[in-house]
Image (tube, grey):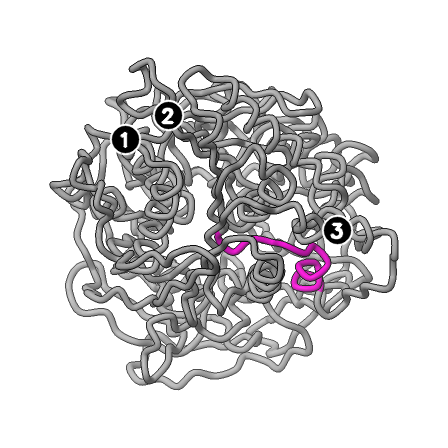
Amino acid sequence: MPLRSALVAPLAGFLALAPFASAQSFTLQQVLRAPFSSNLTAAPQGHSFAWVSNAEGRRNLWVSVDDQARQLTHDTADDGIDLGNLTWTPDGASVVYVRGGDFEFPEKPSPNPARLKDGIEQQIWIAPVHGGEPRLLTSGQAPQVSPDGKTLAYLLKDQVWTLDLTQTGAKPAQLFVGRGKEDDLQWAPDGHALAFVSRRGDHSFIGVFTLSVGQVSYLDPGTEEDSNPAWSPNSRQVAFLRVPPEVGNSYFRAHRTDVPWSICVADAETGQGRELWRAQEGQGSVFHDVATDRQLYWTASNHLVFPWERTGWLHLYAVPVTGGEATELTPGSFEVEHVALGSDHDSLVYSSNQGDIDRRHVWQVAAAGGTPKPITTGQGIEVFPAVSGDGAIAVLRSDARLPMRPATIDGDGLHDLAPQLIPADFPAAQLVVPEPVMLTAADGLELHGQIFLPAAAHDGKRHPALIFFHGGSRRQMLLGWHCMDYYSNAYAMNQYLASLGYIVLSVNYRSGIGYGLNFREALHYGASGASEFNDVLGAGLYLRGRADVDPARIGVWGGSYGGYLTALALSRASDLFAAGVDFHGVHDWNLELENWQEPTYDPNADANAVRVGWESSPLATVKDWRSPVLLIQGDDDRNVQFSQTVRLAAALRAQHTPFEELVFPDEIHGFLLYRDWLAAYTAEAKFFARYFHPQP
């Protein structure tokens, strides 16, 4: 893509390695080359796991059967075609998966950043594990295989369809015509019916389609948002979450309390329901989910397990199906993040930051209660546990030097399932180990961060420094490679910047996760006051006060919400931050709120909120922006409108503030093409190098 600049010289040849790269111990390509593993899924029978490996944009399906790993698909192009929605057939003989589409916004057209002439169709495929080629089943997404393995249920254009898996060449059939946008398909354990969520805009229902009757019934329908259907083991009842509509607008504003949410149980045949349990008022009255698909688990001992923030920390609780008080299963000052049901269907395996606030480890607890048992410990990071039919536990693991990869856990510790995925020239030994630091925001709030110190950090000289702000803002950066591909790339970039001679500080600012409800739901954050600027300012002053940092060479970079904070830093404190790189940042909150609340957003409904939203935006103080900036965005961004960058560029251009821009036509928010990540990061490194002159 051409890179354009305004009032400063263009960055010629940014796709090539920067001139200073020859003095490096490793290249940007090398540190970005290691495959990123995701979508770890366990087989319901046997000792098998599946996952997706993304190696330089080549996404492929891998499996491990009896600890023997092999590749099932063989895509060789960096084509931007994503893989996801992995699910096993009940016998563990095949993996069903989806190829193409936008997995964050499945209702939107398939992105096509490589501009393939025929476009990209979202398709469901099946790959046999024990030999044979993958084959196309149909168009659609969110596949679920029936318990007998004979029927595939899936979604196509927000409707439920099925396909007979026993007949080669069988034609798909729409199961029923629904008025809502159907979602979250869940087969009854005996296969007699299919539960789903019917989204109706300002409310939603739990529906059940009974195959023998050929008709949909809705379970205790009302005016609230019902979600997360969970079948009883005997297939007679369905539990679900019931969340009242929000009172007011909580998008990018603190939302600590509201009308309490509840758990309901209904008869799957009659639809008659009852409220089983209700959250208390005050803390925990707003439902907050864990980071995995399921939020509600019906165990073999007839307990319902769910997340709740009653103590101000996100924990697992259990309540008997017969009713009663909820028992806290995971007490303490930490947060549960990823959850899986054990093979006994009566225990939970989960990741959390218990005892290690800036990492993740895996624990196990019985649904009936008791002391949680640690499954992993140490200096690594273990997330997304998956439990196979034989009770084996696999995780995605990383550490400071090696990125996410699948591993199993046994009495001897962690064992990588596919160590051959790491390239021979991956510079693991040359990466720095980030150190934990505590910062003080301008208003006194304590913050966690990670600092990457270059090899020459202790040479007695002053070095240029960069601050990285993550996106989200519901994220937490860790003391190692991240479990999200976007932030795995960002971690690689921070390592590369450190190798160039920068001191790099990654900040876990307020409104992020990992530190409790009140930290996440920070008062006056985002569109309600930009209170995170206190953290931005505190981070800059922390670096300015270090003896190893040159106070005239402090820069800032980040993407999405991190792009917002980058722009906020430059528009409010150009005297502190000398330059910045803004990836797809938010520059006008009122424009961004429309993106997330469409079609119900009414900018005229609350004039004061509109005023505060504008005052919390970088464009409100753009007149004070003097530092140069590089703006980067794809113009098919579905999270942050491309017009955010258009408007900021126009404002900077009008007042002669130096800026450059790198635009990727047809690319989405989290770039799908590896070559776009490489181009963007190379441009960033060259941009900062010209202003800060690091010494690698």
Q: Are marks 2 and 1 in contact (CB under 8 Å)?
A: yes
Q: Dot 1: within a 10 Å radius of its alpha carbon, few (fewer than 14), some, or many (20 or more) residues?
A: some
Q: Which mark is residue 243?
A: 3
What residue is disc 1 on?
695
Q: Disc 2 versus disc 1: distance between alpha carbons?
A: 8 Å
Q: Could you tell me which quadrant the C terminus lies in? A: top left
Check the image and report above or below for 336 versus 9.
above
Residue 537 or residue 436, whichever sits in front: 537
Q: Disc 3 versus disc 2: distance between alpha carbons?
A: 51 Å
The amino acid sitting under disc 1 is: Gln
* Region of the chain picked out in magenta, as a range: 583-597
Residue 113 x, y percent position in the rendering: 38, 70
Q: Does 381 lie within the magenta span?
A: no
Q: Earlier in the sequence, mark 3 or mark 1?
A: 3
Q: Does 594 lie within the magenta span?
A: yes
The amino acid sitting under disc 3 is: Val
**Left or right of 580 in this view: 125:** left
Q: Which mark is residue 463?
A: 2
**Left or right of 545 in this view: 537:** right
Q: Disc 3 versus disc 1: distance between alpha carbons?
A: 55 Å
The amino acid sitting under disc 2 is: His
Q: Nearer the viewer, mark 3 or mark 1?
A: 1
Residue 394 x, y percent position in the rendering: 33, 38
